[in-house]
Image (cartoon, grey):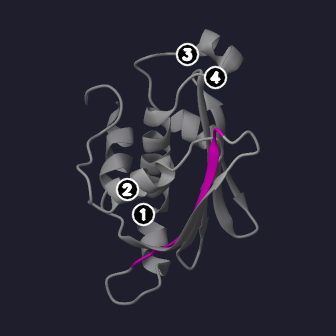
Amino acid sequence: MEKYERELIDTGAVVEFKILNSNVAPCIDGEEAHATADLMLLDEDDDKGYDTVEWGAFGFIFTLANLAFKDAAPRGGSKNDYVEDSYVRLEDMMRCLEFKRGTLQFYCDYLHGRLVKTNITIHQDGRVETSTFCRGSALMTWLRLLQGKNQLEAVGTESK
């Protein structure tokens, strides 16, 4: 993992947030599930996350994207592109990132042969909308990790 990627993970790991609501719904096939969670980034002095968005949005997205990637597996034809010891690199995040209608939006479908299917939208007031498709309840596990309810360690190769 490169220096700037490590710094983004370090930043994302300290962003405080609360889960406003969440839902896990089965897919049509009955075997998979979609998950959604609405979050609020927290500032030190109030319940809104305006300041946290400024310093933590990119790190939060990068960290959550790496957690989603770490748990992702190949599916169908993506097995041909699967790279075992891979992680979300900075250039991968940038290809999946847009600034649209005043929000920072990340969406990753398949990456390095893995089904990631993760969406993260951060609003300027600190509201965050997250969703996954065909990932079961894994989203809630990643959010608990980021809240410190489980041990968090860097995803990817060792630091350079």
Q: CA distance from mark 2 to mark 3?
A: 26 Å
Q: Which residue is mark 2?
A: 12
Tag nearer the camera, 1 or 3: 3
Residue type indicated by callout 4: Arg
Q: Which residues are magenta?
A: 31-42
Pointer 3: what residue?
82
Q: Position of residue 14 (x, y in %)?
A: 30, 62
Mark 2 crowdedness (10 Å alpha carbons): few <14, some 14-19, many ≥20: many
Q: Which residue is mark 4?
A: 75
- In the structure shown, which secondary structural element does the residue marked by tag 2 occupy? helix
Query: Tag 4, which secondary structure?
Result: loop
- 51, above or below 107, in the image: below
The answer to whether 15 appears left or right of 121 in the picture is left
In this view, the mark in front (4 or 2)? 4
Single out the mark in the foreground, 2 or 3: 3
- Residue 85 or 30: which is nearer the viewer? 30
70 versus 102 height, above or below: above
Is residue 79 something one can see in this rendering? yes
